[in-house]
Amino acid sequence: MDPHKVIRYPLMGEKATMLREKENKLSFIVSSESTRKDVKEAIESLYSVKVVRVHSMNTVQGNKKVHVKLAPEFSAEEVASHFGVL
């Protein structure tokens, strides 16, 4: 699956900010057809990072939200600054 079709947009809310700062996690809304493996491959190819874990959930609005934990050698804050969240 094309990485640009998997990732729709990053989340910038209060919870996403706390996860980014405290747990080195990034939060995204992704395509509802994408799997955890698709999300992991898309994040790794788009942002040149190593993903440790992907946690996905469906929202009440019908979107699919994921929290992606990065390896300790990569900073979620730094990656977020590249796509304009900070």
Image: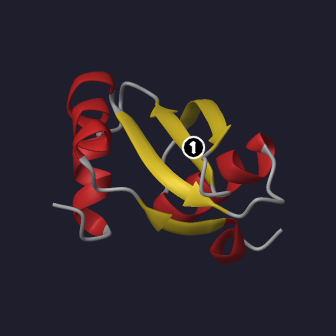
Q: How is the image coloured?
A: secondary structure
Q: Position of residue 35 (x, y in %)?
A: 81, 47
Kindly identify the residue that appears in the image at 62 percent across and 33 percent down: 54
Quarter occupied by the C terminus: bottom left
Quarter occupied by the N terminus: bottom right
Q: Is residue 43 above or below residue 71?
A: below
Q: How many labels sit on residues?
A: 1
Q: Is residue 13 above or below residue 50?
A: below
Amino acid tagged 1: Val
Q: Residue furthest front?
A: 60
Q: Position of residue 50 (x, y in %)?
A: 53, 39
Q: Is residue 81 above or below residue 8?
A: above
Q: Quadrant of residue 73?
A: top left
Q: Position of residue 28 (x, y in %)?
A: 49, 54
Secondary structure state at the residue bearing disc 1:
strand
Kindly identify the residue that appears in the image at 69 percent across and 66 percent down: 6
Q: Is residue 86 left or right of residue 62?
A: left
Q: Quadrant of residue 82?
A: bottom left
Kindly identify the residue that appears in the image at 32 percent across and 69 percent down: 83
Q: Is residue 35 left or right of residue 84?
A: right
Q: Is residue 43 left or right of residue 49?
A: right
Mark 1: few, some, or many residues within 10 Å (few <14, many ≥20)? many
- Tell me the residue that label 1 is attached to: 66
Q: Is residue 80 left or right of residue 59?
A: left
Kindly identify the residue that appears in the image at 54 percent across and 65 percent down: 46
